[in-house]
């Protein structure tokens, strides 16, 4: 009887862990749904509000990212302290609610000014969900299984792109449009993720992680008082500044080869397949290869894949490189989260919140810089500029950070 009870308890525990990882994966899935507004739908939004698809109009619409990410930076810095006062689960649910509100607002947007006001809700929600999802994984998943769990959770955002590209191709590309996508796709999934998080994520939080002045000082000292964690944050800032190329890549290929939105969706589909596979694969490799080594190698590798996309003469070559870049980028992104999460085991919530602020600051700078360079010099110079930033980030990781986990 005792053995049966132990077996039943073990099964319940395994089921609970799967529920935690599954709900966090769907929550992360929700963070990438509205990104189609400024990737696949970039050209279409420019036409909706400005009746033009010129580089100047596209560059103007891309500044939605700048506005959203600047708001996200402020939120990220705030939740680095708030996570010491409020429960991680509550902050995660608040983020999912913001994404839902953003979807409704974008559907109702009657002009570009209103869209600029409402779109940052997605950024706020994304930074809350991202920081808290990885923090909760660090709190509830054992170290030996954490790499694989993080791999699946971060892959959730890319699975969102994969599923979304199929859904757009079937229903929203030329039929219901980008506003229909907000109401009939983004909103229901974000609300479902909210329900699952409420159901599966434990509400209890260790009292030692709740707010007090001493804990506040210790947490920030642990993040900024060590060279390796500070360098990790700076490396991520530079890396995500260069990583904004993914926002412009689809618009560039569509423009260069005069592709319709449905073909762009298929191209993103192939890229997302590679991205998801790379992210999941990284979860199985980090303990064998090492977090730092895999991060450095994959970031350097990404630099050598992006530039040829600008110069290839055939669309199939561009799609192949885009997919290959997704694979290597998936390895890099997933490893980066694992690497950053383990830098400060005693202050994961603070570290991941500040890291999210640095990531979004980098994305905001990248979007502003990218739009400026694109408008003045074109896509080729833009690619060289952003790849140079990726290369610099790889050097920072290589020479100024340390491996957080000995394998």
Image: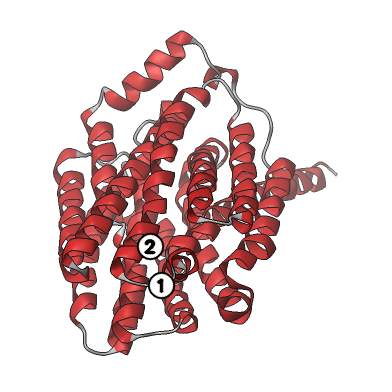
Out of 151 and 367, give the one closest to the viewer: 367
Tell which of 324 and 265 is nearer to you.
Answer: 265
Residue 271 is at least partly visible in this image = yes
Q: Position of residue 132 (x, y in %)?
A: 53, 38
Q: Residue at x 67, y 58 (%)?
A: 189
> Which x, y percent locates residue 223?
33, 27
Depicted 183 relative to depicted 142: above or below: below
Q: Do the residues bearing badges 1 and 2 touch, measured as CB atoms within 8 Å?
A: yes
Residue positioned 22% across, 69% down in the render: 379
Of callouts 1 and 2, the N-terminal one: 1
Question: In the image, 351: left or right of 137?
Answer: left
Q: Residue at x 21, y 76 (%)?
A: 310
Residue 330 bears which disc, if any? 2
Q: Please state the horizontal and vertical placement of residue 72, each as a whole percent of the image.
A: 44, 39
Which quadrant does the N terminus fall into? top right
Closer-to-camera residue (6/287): 287
Residue 274's disc number: 1
Q: In what element is the residue under mark 1?
A: helix
Of 27 and 336, the residue lying toward us: 27
Give the farthest residue toward the top. Answer: 213
Q: Which mark is residue 371?
A: none
Q: How is the image coloured?
A: secondary structure
The answer to whether 100 appears left or right of 218 in the picture is right
Question: Picture quarter containing residue 348?
Answer: top left
Q: Residues within 10 Å of mark 1 (few under 14, many from 20)?
A: many
- Identify whether 277 is placed above or below 391: below
Looking at the image, can residue 246 be seen? no
Helix, strand, or loop for circle 2?
A: helix
Count of marks overlaid on the render: 2
Q: Is residue 54 above or below residue 34?
A: below
| Snapshot quadrant of residue 172 | bottom right
């Amino acid at each position: 009887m005792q053995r049966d009870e132990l077996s039943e308890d073990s099964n319940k525990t395994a089921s609970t862990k799967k529920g935690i990882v599954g709900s966090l994966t769907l929550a992360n899935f929700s963070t990438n749904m509205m990104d189609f507004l400024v990737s696949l739908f970039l050209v279409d939004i420019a036409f909706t509000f400005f009746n033009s698809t010129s580089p100047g109009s596209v560059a103007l619409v891309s500044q939605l990212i700048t506005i959203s990410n600047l708001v996200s930076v402020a939120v990220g810095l705030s939740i680095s302290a708030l996570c010491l006062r409020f429960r991680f689960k509550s902050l995660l649910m608040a983020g999912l609610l913001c994404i839902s509100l953003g979807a409704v607002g974008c559907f109702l947007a009657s002009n570009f000014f209103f869209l600029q006001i409402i779109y940052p809700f997605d950024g706020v929600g994304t930074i809350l969900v991202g920081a808290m999802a990885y923090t909760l994984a660090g709190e509830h998943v054992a170290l030996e299984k954490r790499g694989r769990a993080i791999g699946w959770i971060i892959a959730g955002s890319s699975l969102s792109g994969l599923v979304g590209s199929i859904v757009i191709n079937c229903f929203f590309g030329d039929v219901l449009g980008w506003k229909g996508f907000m109401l009939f796709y983004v909103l229901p999934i974000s609300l479902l993720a909210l329900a699952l998080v409420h159901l599966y994520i434990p509400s209890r939080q260790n009292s030692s992680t709740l707010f007090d002045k001493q804990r506040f000082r210790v947490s920030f000292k642990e993040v900024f008082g060590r060279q390796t964690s500070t360098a990790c944050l700076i490396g991520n800032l530079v890396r995500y500044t260069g990583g904004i190329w993914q926002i412009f890549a689809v618009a560039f290929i569509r423009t260069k080869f005069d592709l319709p939105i449905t073909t762009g969706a298929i191209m993103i589909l192939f890229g997302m397949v590679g991205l998801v596979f790379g992210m999941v694969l990284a979860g199985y490799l980090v303990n064998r290869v090492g977090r730092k080594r895999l991060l450095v190698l994959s970031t350097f590798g990404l630099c050598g894949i992006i530039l040829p996309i600008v110069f290839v003469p055939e669309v199939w070559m561009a799609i192949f490189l885009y997919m290959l870049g997704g694979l290597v980028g998936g390895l890099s992104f997933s490893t980066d989260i694992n690497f950053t999460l383990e830098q400060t085991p005693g202050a994961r919530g603070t570290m991941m919140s500040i890291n999210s602020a640095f990531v979004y600051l980098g994305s905001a700078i990248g979007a502003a810089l990218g739009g400026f360079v694109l408008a003045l010099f074109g896509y080729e110079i833009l690619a060289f500029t952003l790849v140079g930033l990726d290369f610099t980030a790889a050097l920072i990781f290589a020479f100024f950070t340390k491996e957080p986990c000995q394998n």
